[in-house]
Amino acid sequence: MTVHHVQITAEAEGDLFDIGSYIARNDSPERAFGLLDELERACLALATYPGRGNSPPEMSRIGIDLYREMHFQVYRIIYEISGKTVFVYAVVDGRRDLQSLLERRLLRPKNTGTGGSD
């Protein structure tokens, strides 16, 4: 079994922060911390068998099958496998229309450094 390194990008970290902030404000800080822990574990689980995810339909429709997604509860974890590294680009609520977000993030030059989120 090949084990990959999982790199959560600054944009995905921003997504996690936004999700946690929303849950803390609208439910409870305890629930937010618990959900963030579970989401982070789901991302890190991509270290083994990252190919199990499917291509996001929004990207497949425009002929791009480079990216994959994994679902966790209502959230979609969007990532790319590059060699032995899995880059997590987005963690978003799956109930949103993601076409423009994914195009904005995934079709521009990659930035895996620190910075703000979309």
Image: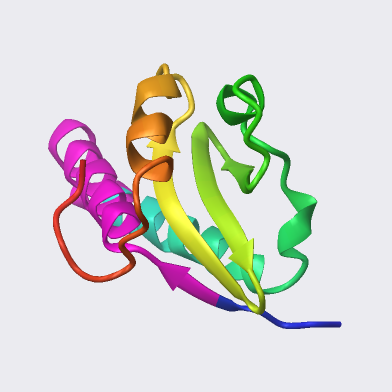
Residue 56 lies, in percent from the top left, at 62, 33
What residue is shown at x 73% (from left), y 40% (from top)?
54
Specify whether 56 is left or right of 104: right
Residue 77 lies, in percent from the top left, at 52, 46
Specify whether 46 is left or right of 37: right
24 part of magenta stretch: yes
Q: Is most of the magenta stretch helix, strand or loop?
A: helix
Residue 102 lies, in percent from the top left, at 42, 33
On the rendered image, what quadrant is the N terminus found in?
A: bottom right
Number of marks drawn? 0
> Eyeballing the image, is 28 above or below 33?
above
Q: Which residues are magenta?
A: 6-31
What residue is shown at x 33% (from left), y 67% (from top)?
112
> Eyeballing the image, is 1 above or below 54?
below
> Eyeballing the image, is 42 above or below 66?
below
On the rendered image, what quadrant is the C terminus found in?
A: top left
